Image (tube, rainbow, N blue to C red):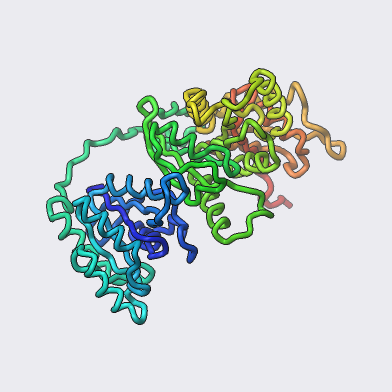
Amino acid sequence: MNFTVAIVGRPNVGKSTLFNRLVGKKLALVDDTPGVTRDRRPGDAKLVDLRFTIIDTAGLEQSGPETLQGRMWLQTEAAIEEADLTLFVVDAKYGLTPADETLGKMLRRRGKPVVLVANKSEAKGSDGGYYDAFTLGLGEPVAISAEHGQGMIDLRDAIVAALGEDRAFPPEIDEPATNVDLRGEEDLEDDDYEPEYDDTKPLRVAIIGRPNAGKSTLINRFLGEDRLLTGPEAGITRDSISVEWDWRGRTIKMFDTAGMRKKARVQEKLEKLSVADSLRSIRFAESVVIVFDATIPFEKQDLQLVDLVAREGRAAILAFNKWDLVEDTQALLADLREKTERLLPQVRGIRAVPISGQTGYGLDKLMQSIIDTDKTWNRRISTAKLNKWLESQQIQHPPPAVSGRRLKLKYMTQVKARPPGFMISCTRPESVPESYIRYLTNGLRADFEMPGVPIRIHLRASENPFENRKKKR
């Protein structure tokens, strides 16, 4: 991205709507309720021929620094400091308020480039608010409608004028050629090919859990700064916020998500939107860390979240947070291990790490568990090894006989990774009992060291070469 732009303004002026318009996706939550956005949220924006990073922020509300609104404003101030230019959004339909004047004075004192944006200019009676915006002393406002996409060309011209042509359009840098895999498509599709794990590829990790489990505090500890809004209030996080950082030379993209309560308790529209955003983050991620509160672990909602991640096919890791509040750590650790094995049989062997987002205890071990689980999630096993293994499994425990005829498992291959998926060619696949499939699944976990990741086994009937051949008379 060439430069960074922050969107600021008082609550409910349309900042998140403009953010979604510029990124071309509905990334930020939008609702008529003031103060929906709390954390600062970055995105890749496109405006005609401009390419830049855009940051959505919380609205200015006059309050003390110890309050939630005060902490939200600290996040907005950090975005203004980080940005090269600020889009100051006012509501042309409603007109100016004392909060707009306060924010205008603050932006003038900072001396950074500012573009004044009069949103909702398509509304009847918006001319008065548009002309009032001149009194802020930030130049001529740009009349737009973020909802309908009006005035985007004028906004583009105002950004270029504020930054200058050289800053808005820096010279392009030729990127070095990337390494190309010279193997042909036939080699790539070879069943006996076992690719090595690429530990240089960026890794997407979602952090999920019940409200107030310590998800945002955990990510802040990883980053070494107060990047995400935290506090004793449950349900502070609403949007799913992504942050990037390096761990031992590898880029990690983490997604902080809203806490997910039981479905029956989620009644408000805004909370439903937050939960839906969290679910999208799970589907987009590769690894998912489910944060448990170590002081009250294994609530029903915790188990349902683990089951959700397993059904989505993601690599799951358990993090027992707030370990610094535990007194008898050895007794609790033994109890957690027993409950993990007993209550989560669908992800047998899942990696579980005691941590403290407040003190930083166990974070390196958690990151190593994430990497190890991702390796397992990406693993491929050659067809030759699988068929030798399948033969040995049938010798140890033959498939059952159904209606007096024994089932035969003839051939096995891995059809996909992420998560590992296997296909077994057999006779009468509809008659193979679930218990035998579980036996094979547990055998795969144990013999090929695949703990904790979802394993999919698909059965299909073997083809009969004589099925379509006409009978000779």
Q: Using the image, determine if residue 368 lies above or below residue 21.
A: above
Residue 183, horizontal then vertical, whole percent: 36, 33
* Residue 144: quarter of image: bottom left
The residue sitting at 33% across, 33% down in the picture is 182
Q: Residue furthest bottom?
A: 124
Q: Residue furthest front?
A: 64
The residue sitting at 48% across, 36% down in the picture is 217
Residue 257, horizontal then vertical, whole percent: 51, 45
Residue 443, horizontal then vertical, whole percent: 68, 26
410 or 172: nearer the viewer: 172
Count of numbered tags: 0
The residue sitting at 65% across, 38% down in the picture is 457
Q: Using the image, determine if residue 99 lies above or below residue 255.
A: below
The residue sitting at 22% across, 50% down in the picture is 110
Q: Is residue 41 visible?
A: no
Q: Residue furthest right?
A: 404
386 or 291: nearer the viewer: 291
Residue 215, horizontal then vertical, whole percent: 52, 38
472 or 78: nearer the viewer: 78
Q: Is residue 161 visible?
A: yes
Q: Using the image, determine if residue 101 lies above or below residue 68.
A: below
